[in-house]
Image (cartoon, grey):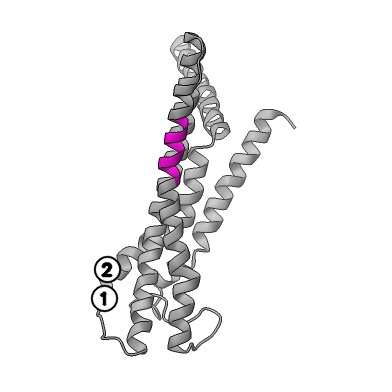
Amino acid sequence: MHYSRFRTVVALIWIGLITFSTALTPDWKRLFGKERNSTSVDICIFSKTMEPHIGFVTSLISQFLPLTSIVVINCILGVKIRRILQEYQQKMIFSQEQQRRNNIIIKKVEFNLFIMSNLFAFLNVPILVLNSFDLIRFAHLIGAPPVEIPITVIRFFLFFASMYPFAEALICLILNQDFKELLLEKWQIIKKKTNLLVSEQSISN
């Protein structure tokens, strides 16, 4: 397969995954559905009922703690990678031209990894907040004082949580070097064809 065709196929697969993920995101149903448009997840997705103590512990261990770890690790990872790249750059001795090229490469890698780490951490925050709402509901069922969460706040975080699959795929897509080169190549072709049509029309007139 020709290299440009291969890149086109890869780009179409990415776009298909973005569309597929966005269309099937469960949070859209919670955001616009009639049955659950006033609360976050109120029951286990595998059962119509859940014992409050089990629900609280399960939600805490399987969702809240892992999501918190993901957010913290991604933030730390972005800072650590940036520091490692800067230290590597200072220790190695290169010629002036090689140093200039290395700086360009390192800056790209540093930017991509730093942005990806922190963006993925940010994308998990709405899901973490929604899970906190679930913990509050379960805590009330096992004896804690009730806490009323405004529906506007819930819908606000539901909207951003529902965008997670789309945003995650879009971030990877935008930071993909092959895709950016493909877009640039296609844009140049379209630009040349447009200029050619304009010049032909001006000549015919």
Of the pair 32 and 81, the residue shown nearer to us:
81
Location of residue 167 with respect to 144 vertically, above or below = above
Where residue 83 appears, as percent x and y from the top left, is: 42, 35
Q: Residue at x 42, y 47 (%)?
A: 76
Residue 115 in sight from this viewpoint: no
Q: Residue at x 44, y 71 (%)?
A: 29
Name the outermost residue toward the right.
1
Of the pair 105 and 42, the residue shown nearer to us:
105
Secondary structure that dominates the magenta span = helix
Picture quadrant where residue 79 is located: top left
- Image side of residue 15 versus residue 119, left or right: right
Are discs 1 and 2 less than 8 Å apart at CB? yes
Location of residue 3 with respect to 174 vertically, above or below = above
Where residue 202 appears, as percent x and y from the top left, is: 43, 12
**Magenta-tinted stretch:** 77-85
Q: Which mark is residue 149?
A: 1
Residue 166 in sight from this viewpoint: yes
Location of residue 108 with respect to 77 vertically, above or below = above
Give the Cα separation between the discs numbered 1 and 2.
7 Å
Question: Which residue in the protein does label 2 denote?
Answer: 153
Of the pair 73 and 32, the residue shown nearer to us:
73
Location of residue 158 with respect to 108 vertically, above or below = below
Instruction: Specify the amino acid type for callout 1.
Output: Ile
